[in-house]
Amino acid sequence: MKLSEELAWRGFVNQTTIKDLSLLDGQPISFYFGVDPSADSMQIGNLAATMMVRHFIDAGHKAYLLVGGATGIIGDPDGKANERNLKTLDEIAKNKAAIAAQYKTVFAGKDFTLVDNYDWFKNINYIDFLREIGKNVPLSQMLSRDFVQARIGADGTGISYAEFSYSLIQGYDFLHLNREYGVSLQVCGADQWGNSVAGVDLIRRLDGHEAHVYSVPLIVNKATGVKFGKSEGGAVWLDDKKTSVYTFYQFWLNVDDASVVDLLKIYTLLSKDKIDALEAEVQSNPGARAAQKTLAHEVTLLVHGAERTASVERVTSVLFGGEAFTTLSDEDIEVLAAEIPTVNVGSTVIESLVTSGVASSNGEARRLIESGAVSVNGEKLSSDQPIKSRSLVKKGKNSFILAK
């Protein structure tokens, strides 16, 4: 499948300055994709764009992956109702290193060049920048941006000169990369369209070169109609310290039937034949959730690797699939301990239910046991007893306690 066909089938066609997408099927193009270090991790909204970048790389195009050390110092104001709080240089350095490491994980084994816009901004002369760049950016173009109008309107909070100038800085990134590396295409998230076309205009005005932007569409949850990528606890991050591997896996495992096929196309590298087969299974046997299991496996494998993916799959099978608790390794137990209440071996089942908050009182705990709603390592109880070894206590279908 040609790249233009692949992008269309996977749902990656969105705003672009390219009039004929067959341009992407020809000679290799040098392109760039950037992430600002506003946090010490990308989240799954960024991951959608990086998956699209992966297809560009696989088609033979040359990737420059940018970590925005300079733009991160200011902070992108687009979509923000108020001024951002500036991050310290130490925070930005830490965040840059974390995002660069995630690039290397997601694009492992692929050819790309990592760049940081701080490298070309740190010694730039302000007067020279205004003379060469600022003189060639119409103020009307900057004032027309939706976020600027919202911030300076009657109900707006106002905008600083620094944040107002953000698109000027990003536009210069494109110009610099075009001059230094022949980069003629920026691949970006849908929310970066305005900042990106500023670079196209700057390249045309200053050097007379043709450059283009290709944006990934906003991923929307079909069931709710809202932006995809949020869980009840907030954003879903690639960093396991911000979103545990187990929670990450469960997020994908629990996507709805209406969205799962689209998400397989966007977030995995599975072939059309494989995804078509999973789509047919969603229709014929939705209860098996084969598509969701495949999606969770593939995305977790990409972000967290084979060993940790296998571990959360084993834990999930024990909690929800009837697999014996004794099959879990010590490492699996540690994964489980981070996700569910824990009690000490030696506690009684009633004590475990109450101290973990699964039951509100000894009386309620006793009634749960007597009604057959409580099991230890898969064996239903009829009366209270001490827990003598490492065990999994389960109440109903979805409440668990680990004794360790």
Image: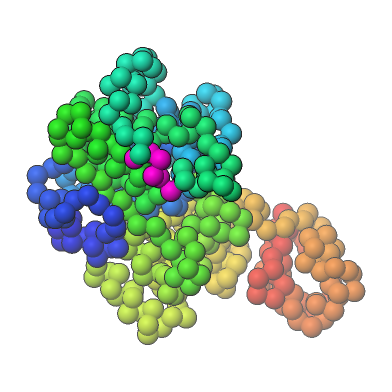
Instruction: Locate residue 135, reporting x and y percent.
Output: 30, 25
Q: In which quadrant is the N terminus drawn?
A: bottom left
Q: Is residue 238 visible?
A: no
Instruction: Locate residue 306, reporting x and y percent.
Output: 41, 51
Say above or below: 103 vs 9. Answer: above
Q: Nearer the viewer, residue 243 or 233?
A: 233
> Left of 138 or right of it: where is 160?
right
Instruction: Please identify the residue farthest to the front as the structure is shown.
Output: 154
Using the rendered view, name the quadrant where residue 114 is placed. top left
Q: In which quadrant is the C terminus drawn?
A: bottom right
Using the rendered view, name the quadrant where residue 210 is placed. top left
Q: Nearer the viewer, residue 293 or 56?
A: 56
Instruction: Locate residue 339, reporting x and y percent.
Output: 64, 56
Instruction: Identify the magenta region.
Output: 141-147
Instruction: Residue at 42% x, 34% y: name it.
Output: 166
Say above or below: 80 vs 9. Answer: above
Instruction: Residue at 89% x, 69% y: name it.
Output: 362
